[in-house]
Amino acid sequence: MRLGGLRYLIKQGWRNMGANRLMTFAGVGVLTACFLITGIAALLSMNVGRVVDHLASLNEIIITVKMDVDDAEAEGYGVQLRALPNVQDAEFISKAAAFDEVKDLLSDYGEGLMDGIDHIFPAKYNVTVQDINYIDETDAQIRALDWVERTYVSNDITSIMLTIRNAVTYGGWGLVIVLAVVSVIVISNTIRLTVFARRREISIMKYVGATNTFIRLPFFVEGMTVGIIAGVLATGIICGVYYLVYEYIRSMYNVWIMSLMDSLIPLGEIWYLVAVGTILLGMLLGGVGTAFSVRKHLKV
Amino acid sequence: MRLGGLRYLIKQGWRNMGANRLMTFAGVGVLTACFLITGIAALLSMNVGRVVDHLASLNEIIITVKMDVDDAEAEGYGVQLRALPNVQDAEFISKAAAFDEVKDLLSDYGEGLMDGIDHIFPAKYNVTVQDINYIDETDAQIRALDWVERTYVSNDITSIMLTIRNAVTYGGWGLVIVLAVVSVIVISNTIRLTVFARRREISIMKYVGATNTFIRLPFFVEGMTVGIIAGVLATGIICGVYYLVYEYIRSMYNVWIMSLMDSLIPLGEIWYLVAVGTILLGMLLGGVGTAFSVRKHLKV
Amino acid sequence: MAKKPIIADSSVMISLTKVKKVYPGGHTALDNVNLEIRRGEFVFVLGHSGAGKSTFLKLILREEVATSGRVVVGGRDLSRIRQRDIPYLRRGLGVVFQDFRLIPSMTAFENVAFAMRVTNIAEREIKKRVPYVLNLVGLAGKARNYPAELSGGEQQRVALARALVHSPPIIIADEPTGNIDPELSVEIMELLKAINMVGTTVVVVTHEHDLAQRFSERIITIDHGAVVADDQTKGGGAF
Amino acid sequence: MAKKPIIADSSVMISLTKVKKVYPGGHTALDNVNLEIRRGEFVFVLGHSGAGKSTFLKLILREEVATSGRVVVGGRDLSRIRQRDIPYLRRGLGVVFQDFRLIPSMTAFENVAFAMRVTNIAEREIKKRVPYVLNLVGLAGKARNYPAELSGGEQQRVALARALVHSPPIIIADEPTGNIDPELSVEIMELLKAINMVGTTVVVVTHEHDLAQRFSERIITIDHGAVVADDQTKGGGAF
Ligand SMILES: Nc1ncnc2c1ncn2[C@@H]1O[C@H](COP(=O)(O)OP(=O)(O)OP(=O)(O)O)[C@@H](O)[C@H]1O
Ligand SMILES: Nc1ncnc2c1ncn2[C@@H]1O[C@H](COP(=O)(O)OP(=O)(O)OP(=O)(O)O)[C@@H](O)[C@H]1O
Ligand SMILES: [Mg+2]
Ligand SMILES: [Mg+2]
């Protein structure tokens, strides 16, 4: 095909968008809406996943060191713990510190309660793990160490966290997939309708001797342009809303929130993912989808 | 209008659905998809809201009774507590029970630790509130009672719960509203496209002397039928998915889950809400929406 | 509910006074047209392609609105008619459109029946009348075909059947024989003539001089948007 | 890339052998049609409404496929032609459709230009040729109007201009004067005759006997799907 011909077909695609304003508007609207829904669901899911991961990582294995091991020796064993595969960090708590902990805990019950019993408290380690799914295995490895008296894993919290994490991972991404599928159905229905409304025009072109490629190219250009516009719009709206929500949460000034902020994903890290994702998908769905649904009207 | 004429117009609406199968399919598909998205978001939001409410309601005010009040007298004061406006329940813990609690707590640290100090533990009340938003007011009222030594409210947990609850309430329902608006846009775009594809037909009817009502009624019937079908489909899918998820969660047999189950809304309580909501909305959107968008093609 | 058609039983059925029609874009299709068509007349409108013949019919139908001047149909001033009265005006006018305007999703039968349905006639009546009219125009065997399955002439005859079906006081036909062979054309014109004999006003646009000469009592010639000739009592010799 | 039109320069341009066409639904539109049209002929096809004239043209265009028998156009057997070669076949055929088939979203100019664009002709060439052809059919002033803004006859002439624009070896016209007044019809037929003189094969479907008698060297008459007459060397007296 000559270059001039190609230029004509591309221009034709754009001219059609103006001539079929209702369809252009409908196409952009539907695509943008679907991108919004799916994009927001994905971002939500990613963030909740990160927050839950963060909370889960706070879950600890508490180790009591045998009474006959002195603080200096016990602190040295930290190297062994940190060398274990799934261990994130191991915080040492000396005998004296452990005593203070309990004393604090019981301070409500009156002064003098704990006098003279400081020698009975063992040293401890608070161990955080990398992957909470393998906390039981890590626990077993720690218990095998000869200087360890016993270990505690809060099973309730572990299972809560695991349940929430799994719910978020499967549920959240499941929702994203369902929304994506629904979006594709809605989008392809819309495209088929817009092409359907112009089926006569398509068939006339065939009768005048136009090849399938010649007819399809302007539709392809048109669909791709609609897709790009929708992608840009969706990126703008998603990023705008995300930024506002992010800033709102940050403005709430709350200890708990502050610790959450670290797990929330800042806009700077994801805006280009959103942009590339929606715009590429827009081009693909719009361009290929349209060119494809023209096909069934070409058989004349 | 004669009854026969009305019957004809209704039949005509149904016949059109067959003749315009692509549009019927597109309409049902888009409506169903939108109902699914919005319905699932609403149910999710309702359930998370209920769960968080439930968890929040577990948040307690712990009261230490003055040491000089004996157990019998202290237990009697429960009536005062339960009479307070925001108090849900007040659980009495006698001096002996309070001692046992602490003993349990410290059992790791070796036997005999607590011997001879049972007299130093005061009796306690665990008070749960109806509305966590007013927990501070309730705390103040309790502290004003003369037999109360002091009270503890876990501020961290309270604020976490309040934050989550607000996030779920505003965020969740905000999402539902956004999805609903998006759905209405997508639906009305689709309807406008299906009507647009038949604009010539509509204008020809006008040239033959058909009144606006006469032209619109079959479209109205068609739109309403599409809406009802979409409503029924969406209800079926939503309820089916909901039932499966509900049963799956129940099958997980976990203490924590079991306590959650009480706050999850069983299918029996909501299926008719879903059904009435989607089907009514379907009739409204489909019927009125279609009849309305026919209007702009009637001005000939 | 069943409103009467708006066409009053006046002696002047169609009257145009100083009518001018300028299309958006600036083309003047009709200019200073003055015309009266009386009840029971059989009028031919002749003119070159683009002379303004269809525009004249579109004004009568209120498909287009005159830029200036008065168009009165059946005693009704169309510049003053309310939007919701237009359907009732059109029910009094049986029209064959130059581009047929058949509803593609309806069979020939349904296309004709539809014109009766809008006037709220009983189904029993429709079931009798439509096949009769289709038979009149020679389409008895094509009742169940869709427009896309009909030849050009057959589509034109469906349009004619639709115009005749509810026996309107005025029949307007834009090139009703444009796609039909001469023998059939004569038959169709004789049919219109017979309908005219029982009191119906008939206006036919055509470019077939021969037909016009043979059947008409009055030939109006339009050229470049103006009435250049209006010959009464010409022809009519066929009867 | 620019493939040559498929029409070979054979001496027999169109040949039908024992062609039968039965439409879905059972109507037999053509039955046992045998016909040969040679290069440079000017052929009229006459017949009653519904006789099968348009069906005959649709078979040549491969818009419809013969139920049985052989249709050969420019040396190509249309029952064997590949789907993707059909556009190249159609580029060799300039067609005026009975229902015009103008693209409603394009102006008159664009509708005509489109037929050149599909054959990949340079824009400069198009800018020269299209106004020339529009002028030939008397539409110089209507280039920028959309089909909905044209009269019936004007639409028909746009369709004719489109068929003529890329000087195809075969021109096929279905009722090209159905919406045009007699004077203009004669002009149009003279135009076609002139084009025929320089070697183009022309097939015209019409129901206007007079025109056929005046311009044709050969009149094929179809009745009820069969060729009932094929009169060579008749007429042609106009030149
Ligand atoms: N797609 C179709 N399906 C069924 N029947 C059809 C179809 N197309 C045409 N026919 C029938 O085939 C017959 C021949 O049609 P055709 O269009 O060839 O007639 P024609 O000779 O061109 O008539 P006219 O002069 O009225 O245009 C007609 O009776 C018509 O009803
Ligand atoms: N909607 C429109 N916008 C602009 N110009 C128009 C419109 N409709 C018609 N015209 C122009 O007005 C003139 C008269 O058109 P009209 O349809 O009345 O002609 P006509 O006499 O019916 O011709 P024909 O015999 O070819 O049908 C034509 O030149 C046409 O191009
Ligand atoms: Mg006209
Ligand atoms: Mg034909």
Image (cartoon, coloured by chain):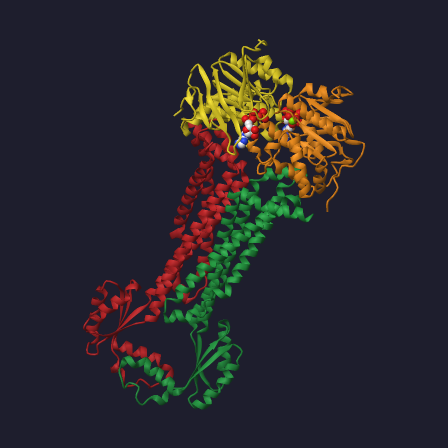
Chain colours: A red, B green, C orange, D yellow
Task: Give residue C165's position: percent from left, percent from top.
Answer: 68, 35
Residue closest to the eye, C133 or B188: C133
Q: In the rendered view, would you say B59 is above or below A221? A: below
> Which of A257 and C127 lies nearest the eye of the viewer?
C127
Ligand 3 found in image quarter: top right
Extreme-right residue of the structure = C11
User: In terms of image quadrants, where is residue D97?
Assistant: top right
Between residues A122 and B296, which one lies in front from this camera angle? Answer: B296
> Up-down: is C80 above or below C177?
below
Quadrant where the image shows the C terminus of chain D: top right
- A272 vs C213: above or below: below
Instruction: Name the one closer to the observer, C154 or D61.
Output: C154
Residue C131 point in image, percent of width and height: 65, 35
**Where residue B237 sits in the image (x, y, percent)?**
46, 56
List x then y, in percent, for residue D44.
Answer: 55, 17
Residue C215, picture quadrant: top right
The N terminus of chain D: image quadrant: top left
Relative placement, left or right, of D38 versus B217 is left
Q: Is residue D106 visible?
A: no
Residue at 40% of width from left, 24% of height from top?
Answer: D2
Image label count: 0
Say whether residue A72 is visible: yes
